[in-house]
């Protein structure tokens, strides 16, 4: 079965520093991977996806993610964090029936 | 343009009651999904529609849960004989098709069963 894991419940970074939110996947076949962000009292917002092609995917709000097949990872990154990036981040993989299988989420806190 | 909308935003009901949750997807999106998100967890898949038909309902937890999409647009998630364990945020999402397109999520309906 398709699944993702987010090993960190919480990530804390200082504003201006680079950030990484980790995700590993387990799939049969080709992985179709996604990152979403959830702000308080708001719906999940799409950030980026990997379907095929370049391993480095660029998305919204300056975020990017690197697909690494050998490490089965799809870590989310941003070169310089903003306080406004503080939110809950979810990694997801497309399931066998077009559903989305989500990780448990990582809470990112960016401190001024 | 308008995003995915869900009504009501909050629903409080008593154990044993029947509830309906509504989702209005983005116009033109043929695929519609329902998820359930419990506190501290990621969304959990419930059911997927392609057009009017339920293409996959394997995520529905039991036969108290049912969803319809009669005209291929608006969908209603129906829960009979609600239980306290049904309390969660119910999310709806839509996408252009059921393939690799990203899903756009609504703000959710917070269901509380007392």
Image (tube, rainbow, N blue to C red):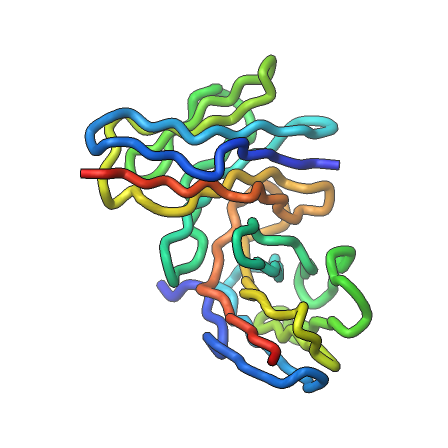
Count the marks: how many? 0
Quadrant position of residue B99? top right
Above or below B81: residue B53? above
Give coordinates of residue B105: x percent, y percent.
48, 57
Please tell me which residue is depicted at 57% across the width and 41% down the height of the picture.
Answer: A103
Above or below B85: residue B45? above
- Residue placed most toward the observer, A5 or B35: A5
Q: Quadrant of the N terminus of chain A?
A: top right
Find the residue positioned furthest to the top.
Answer: A70
Q: Is residue B105 left or right of residue B32?
A: left
- Residue placed most toward the observer, B37 or B47: B37
Give coordinates of residue B112: x percent, y percent.
56, 75
Please tell me which residue is depicted at 63% across the width and 75% down the height of the picture.
Answer: B76
Residue A2: in sight, yes or no? yes
Find the residue positioned furthest to the right.
Answer: B63
Q: Quadrant of the C terminus of chain A?
A: top left
Above or below B111: residue B13? below
Please tell me which residue is depicted at 65% across the width and 49% down the height of the picture.
Answer: A99
Give coordinates of residue A13: x percent, y percent.
29, 31
Q: Is residue A11 left or right of residue A91?
A: left
Residue B55: in sight, yes or no? no
Give coordinates of residue A79: x percent, y percent.
27, 25
- Residue placed most toward the observer, B67 or B98: B67
């Amino acid at each position: 079965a398709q699944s993702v894991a987010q090993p960190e419940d919480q990530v804390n970074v200082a504003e201006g520093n680079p950030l990484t939110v980790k995700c590993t996947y387990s799939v049969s076949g080709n992985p179709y991977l996604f990152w979403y962000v959830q702000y308080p009292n708001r719906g999940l917002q799409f950030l980026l996806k990997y379907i095929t092609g370049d391993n480095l995917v660029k998305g919204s709000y300056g975020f990017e993610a690197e697909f690494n097949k050998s490490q089965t990872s799809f870590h989310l990154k941003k070169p310089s964090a903003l306080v406004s990036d503080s939110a809950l981040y979810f990694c997801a993989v497309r399931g066998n029936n077009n559903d989305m299988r989500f990780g448990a989420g990582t809470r990112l806190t960016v401190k001024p | 343009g308008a995003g995915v909308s869900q009504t009501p935003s909050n629903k409080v009901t008593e154990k044993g009651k029947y509830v309906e949750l509504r989702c209005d997807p983005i116009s033109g999106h043929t695929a519609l999904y329902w998820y359930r998100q419990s506190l501290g967890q990621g969304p959990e898949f419930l059911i997927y529609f392609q057009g009017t038909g339920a293409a996959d309902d394997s995520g529905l937890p039991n036969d108290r849960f049912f969803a319809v999409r009669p005209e291929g647009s608006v969908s209603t998630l129906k829960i009979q004989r609600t239980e306290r364990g049904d309390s969660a945020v119910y999310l709806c999402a839509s996408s252009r098709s059921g393939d690799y397109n990203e899903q756009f999520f609504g703000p959710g309906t917070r269901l509380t069963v007392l």
